[in-house]
Image (cartoon, helix red, strand yellow):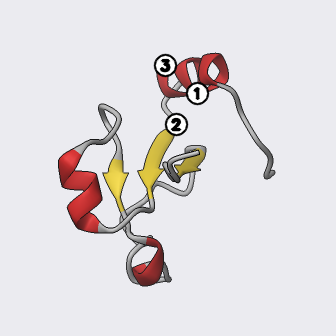
């Protein structure tokens, strides 16, 4: 399932065990990221980089684009 979620949805999903993936470049992740987020830069996203994610748990992917 794909779609957009709001802040309250993210909190609820995280409380239920969802994985939070930040796809900005590593330097931006180091500067600031949400607690518990996993860094997988978009340019490196692929089978090898997502292998560590638990396929049995939901994944929330987010990107801060400055809007």
Q: Is residue 19 above or below residue 44?
A: above
- 10 Å neighbourhood of mark 1: few (<14), some, or many (≥20)? some
Q: Nearer the viewer, mark 1 or mark 3?
A: 1
Which residue, given by chain and number where applicable, does mark 1 sit on?
Answer: 10
Looking at the rendering, which quadrant does residue 36 occupy? Answer: top left
Q: Is residue 9 above or below residue 47?
A: above
Q: Which mark is residue 18?
A: 2
Residue at 55%, 44% in the rendered image: 57
- 10 Å neighbourhood of mark 3: few (<14), some, or many (≥20)? few
Disc 2 element: loop
* Pointers 1 and 3 in contact (C-beta within 8 Å): no
Q: Nearer the viewer, mark 2 or mark 1?
A: 1
Q: Viewer-proximal residue, 2 or 41?
A: 41
- C-alpha distance separating marks 3 and 2: 7 Å
Residue at 21%, 63% in the rendered image: 27
Q: Viewer-proximal residue, 6 or 18?
A: 6
* Pointers 2 and 1 in contact (C-beta within 8 Å): yes
Which residue, given by chain and number where applicable, does mark 3 sit on?
Answer: 15
Q: Position of residue 48 (x, y in %)?
A: 40, 83
Q: Is residue 57 above or below residue 43?
A: above
**Image position of 37 (left or right of 62):** left
Could you tell which of marks 1 and 3 lies nearer the N-terminus? 1
Residue at 40%, 82% in the rendered image: 44
Residue at 39%, 70% in the rendered image: 41
Q: Is residue 21 above or below residue 17?
A: below
Q: Position of residue 63 (x, y in %)?
A: 51, 53
Disc 1 element: helix
- C-alpha distance separating marks 1 and 3: 8 Å
**Image position of 30 (left or right of 28):** left
């Amino acid at each position: 399932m794909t779609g957009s979620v709001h802040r309250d949805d993210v909190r609820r999903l995280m409380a239920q065990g969802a994985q939070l993936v930040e796809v900005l470049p590593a330097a931006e992740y180091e500067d600031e990221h949400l607690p518990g987020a996993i860094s997988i830069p978009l340019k490196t996203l692929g089978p090898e980089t997502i292998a560590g994610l638990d396929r049995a748990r939901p994944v929330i992917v987010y990107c801060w684009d400055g809007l």
